[in-house]
Every structure is written in structure tokens, then in C-alpha cells.
């Protein structure tokens, strides 16, 4: 029995679709008319928040405090929580909301 190979075509299609959706929402939020912004906020924001919550719920600690989703490899190499994806998410949200980069001086 051979191990199944990852389906990169499906991954790439899903990734491209998600990025296109995020770009569309971002463009409307930044440059759209007020009515379009309100429509996007009502239609897209709840869906995007649900997706964000689903991803965050995957990256929760196991009994040893290691991320369940980032457990690839040997058990002693598993990442502690908060894992890199959660930290990157938090940094991206903070940077977008404050306009400050990672090494901003106060």
C-alpha cells in the first residue's frame, strides 16, 4: 500500500479562491462606496470570522501544552502553544489595525 500524495491542484485552487475573496473584501472595505462596504460587512465579515474561528480552534493545546494541528514530526518536536500560525495571525491583525510594523519604536 502506498501513501497518498497531497492533492496540490485542489490546495492551490482553494488557496487562490480564498485569497481572491479576501482581496475583494479588502478592496471594497478600503475603496468602496459606503453602501458596498455595509453590504460586504453584513455578508462577508460573519463568514470570514467563522473561518477564522475554525482555524483558531484547530490550533489548541493537547494535554502536554502542544498544538494539536502543528504536531507534525516526532512527539518531542511538537510546537508549544501558542504556535507559529496563531502568533502570525495575531501579528497580522495587530499590524493591520495599528499600522505599526513588527519593530515599531514608540
Image (spheres, rainbow, N blue to C red):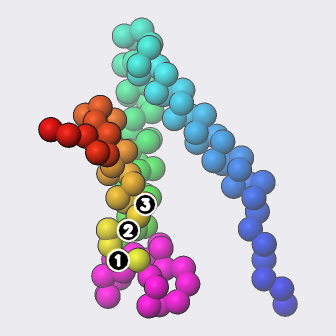
Q: Is residue 75 magenta?
A: yes
**Where 45 sits versus 56, above or below?**
above
Q: In screen coordinates, is 73 left or right of 68? A: right
- Indicate the quadrant containing the C terminus: top left, top right, bottom left or bottom right: top left
Tell me whether the residue at label 2 lies in contact with that at label 1, contact meaning CB atoms closer than 8 angstroms.
Answer: yes
- Residue at the location (44% across, 82% down)? 78
- Indicate the quadrant containing the N terminus: top left, top right, bottom left or bottom right: bottom right
Q: How crowded is the residue under tag 3: few (<14 C-alpha within 10 Å), some, or many (20+)?
A: some
Q: Which residue is labeled 1 in the image?
A: 80
Q: In screen coordinates, is 44 left or right of 5? A: left
Where residue 41 sits, quadrant-wise, is: top left
Q: Which x, y percent locates residue 9? A: 78, 54
Q: Which residue is labeled 3 in the image?
A: 85
- Residue at the location (35% across, 77% down)? 80
Tell me whether the residue at label 2 lies in contact with that at label 3, contact meaning CB atoms closer than 8 angstroms.
Answer: yes
Question: Magenta residues, as a range?
Answer: 61-78
In whole angstroms, how far apart are the C-alphas of marks 2 and 3?
6 Å
Identify the secondary structure beneath mark 1: loop
Identify the secondary structure beneath mark 2: loop
In whole angstroms, how far apart are the C-alphas of marks 2 and 1?
6 Å
Amino acid at each position: 500500500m502506498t501513501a497518498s500524495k497531497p492533492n496540490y491542484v485542489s490546495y492551490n485552487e482553494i488557496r487562490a479562491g480564498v485569497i481572491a475573496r479576501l482581496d475583494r473584501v479588502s478592496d471594497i472595505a478600503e475603496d468602496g462606496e459606503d453602501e458596498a462596504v455595509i453590504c460586504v460587512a453584513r455578508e462577508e465579515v460573519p463568514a470570514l470570522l467563522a473561518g477564522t474561528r475554525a482555524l483558531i480552534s484547530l490550533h489548541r493545546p493537547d494535554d502536554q501544552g502542544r498544538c494539536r494541528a502543528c504536531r507534525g514530526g516526532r512527539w518531542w518536536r511538537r510546537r508549544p502553544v501558542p504556535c507559529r500560525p496563531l502568533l502570525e495571525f495575531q501579528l497580522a491583525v495587530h499590524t493591520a489595525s495599528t499600522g505599526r510594523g513588527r519593530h515599531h519604536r514608540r
